[in-house]
Amino acid sequence: MKQLVVKKTFLLAAICASTLVLQAQKGAQEKANFVHIKAGESSAEILRKAANIVPTPRQLRWQQLELTAFFHFGVNTFTGKEWGTGKEDPQTFNPTALDADQWVRVAKEAGIRQVILTAKHHDGFCLWPTATTKHSVASSPWKEGKGDVVKEVAAACKKYNIGFGIYLSPWDMNAPVYGTDAYNDFFMEQLTELLTQYGRVDEVWFDGANGEGPNGKKQVYDFGRWYAHIRKLQPEAVIAIMGPDVRWVGTETGYGRETEWSVVPADNLDQDAVAASSQQGVAFKPQGDMRGDDLGSRQKINNAKGLVWYPAETDVSIRPGWFYHTKEDSLVKTPQKLLDIYYSSVGRNGVLLLNIPPDGRGLVHEADVAAMQGWKALRDATFNNNLAKGAAITSVNGVRPAALLDDNYATYWTTKGSDTTAVIELDLKGTKTFDVLMLQEQISVGQRIESFVLEYQSGGQWMKATEGSTVGYKRLLRFDAVTANKVRLRITASRLQPTLAAFGLYKQAAQ
């Protein structure tokens, strides 16, 4: 009899294990970086698909950086121009005290986790000794033509354990072959040098600039070939802006949308592409409306041919221009302005790309350094103390509420069954004063929350402190200061079960 019971127990366990495996396999199949929408699919089915689209590993790593930096540096630094002409004499490039270590150290100390160097801007001048052209540092007086800015920045990034990326302008006003088929081969050679000679590259950044070359013609760029080459040589690198992994937010102000969906419609996703898809993600630039105020609402996705995880990078310069100009030393953005930009970029489900242009000496200017240090101090003074820490959490229809405050992004709260709304109540164990809310979805499950309200208890009644729409990787909301000992978060709409990996309440530092 005991043997029969044991056999039945083992059989039941095996059946349960098989069921879990099948469910896991089904879930894995449902979750992808993009998906095709079939004609006639219901709104409910489209919503389910949207809720299960997730970032690739490279996109998730990029999103978790939060803060990245641009180093615009080149002949424009010495001519005073924003855009060169390609006719500049390489002798113009001659920094007197170039210190890439200082650039990267300043960025790292400000909390920036990855930098991107303008290896070649539209003028075609290359910051490395390329074999493709004489229009490079090899023809400059800097280090008697033996210098390599790309090498020095890459080495500094490795030293400080910070990500390294390159900007390579597709437009080249100097290359004689620009405007012909031969230019795409030329560009491939430059890409190969940059992606094979400097170790790991974490981001490749293209813009869409496309003007005339020396022959008066515009170039037809072979982006598909370039993307495939990058995937082969640096498979973990994100390809940004004119690329498949990261899109431009649409302005150069540093301010993202109030409602920012990472899941957006794309018109060029076909069934064959979906059949071949995996967590490696798409290898072509998604096409569709990427500039409107509303990119991914229910109305937008209901009319889509396909959906893709395509998150926003929010770029801005610390100065009015992108290259260094002495006349702008007094116009560097203040720490307070940078903080407002932080709330409106990182705090709106974006990654901030802040340009910090080195000066003619080859150093980040003292004014920029001071602004960065002040900005970091303001962020630390606010976000180093989560006033919700130690709170007692109640969530009637929720599971794993402790995950909200465990400082572990991998763990997350969600709802039981198929609930798409929820209430999370926190007893703060004492009266606290706060004016910032921080929320983080676990985007490895998907981006789902569509609306929420934060309330506080006052005189036995619940009063609204703030409200918002999307959350995504991180949402930060400022509001008039509130003093209370109990708060509750009401998630009022979500695509399938919502998730939250983190919850925070903070008091803004005095400015």
Image (tube, helix red, strand yellow):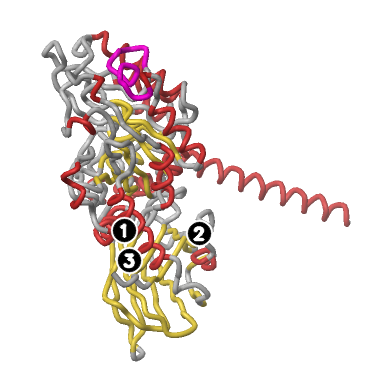
* Discs 3, 1 touching: Cβ within 8 Å: no
| Residue 472 pos. (x, y %) | 36, 54
Q: Nearer the viewer, residue 275 or 508?
A: 508
Separation of disc 2 and disc 1 at Cα?
18 Å
Give the residue pinned by disc 3: 452
Crowding around mark 3 (Cα neighbors within 10 Å: few <14, some 14 to 19, many 20+) is: many
Which image quadrant is residue 228 in? top left
**Residue 171 painted magenta:** no
The residue sitting at 38% across, 64% down in the picture is 438
Amino acid marked by disc 3: Phe
Amino acid marked by disc 2: Tyr
| Residue 126 pos. (x, y %) | 31, 22
| Residue 130 pos. (x, y %) | 36, 16
Q: Is residue 116 visible?
A: yes
For label 2, the SS is: loop
**Residue 133 painted magenta:** yes
The residue sitting at 13% across, 14% down in the picture is 217
Compared across the picture, whether 51 is left or right of 172 comes to right
Crowding around mark 2 (Cα neighbors within 10 Å: few <14, some 14 to 19, many 20+) is: many
Which image quadrant is residue 37 in? top left
Give the residue pinned by disc 1: 450
The residue sitting at 36% across, 34% down in the picture is 98
Compared across the picture, whether 50 is left or right of 81 comes to right
Separation of disc 2 and disc 3 at Cα?
17 Å
For label 3, the SS is: strand
Q: Which residues are magenta?
A: 130-143
Residue farthest to the left, as pictured: 216
Which image quadrant is residue 477 in? bottom left
| Circle nearer the viewer, 2 or 1 | 2
The label number, if any, that marks residue 1 in the structure image:
none
Separation of disc 3 and disc 1 at Cα?
7 Å
Give the residue pinned by disc 2: 412
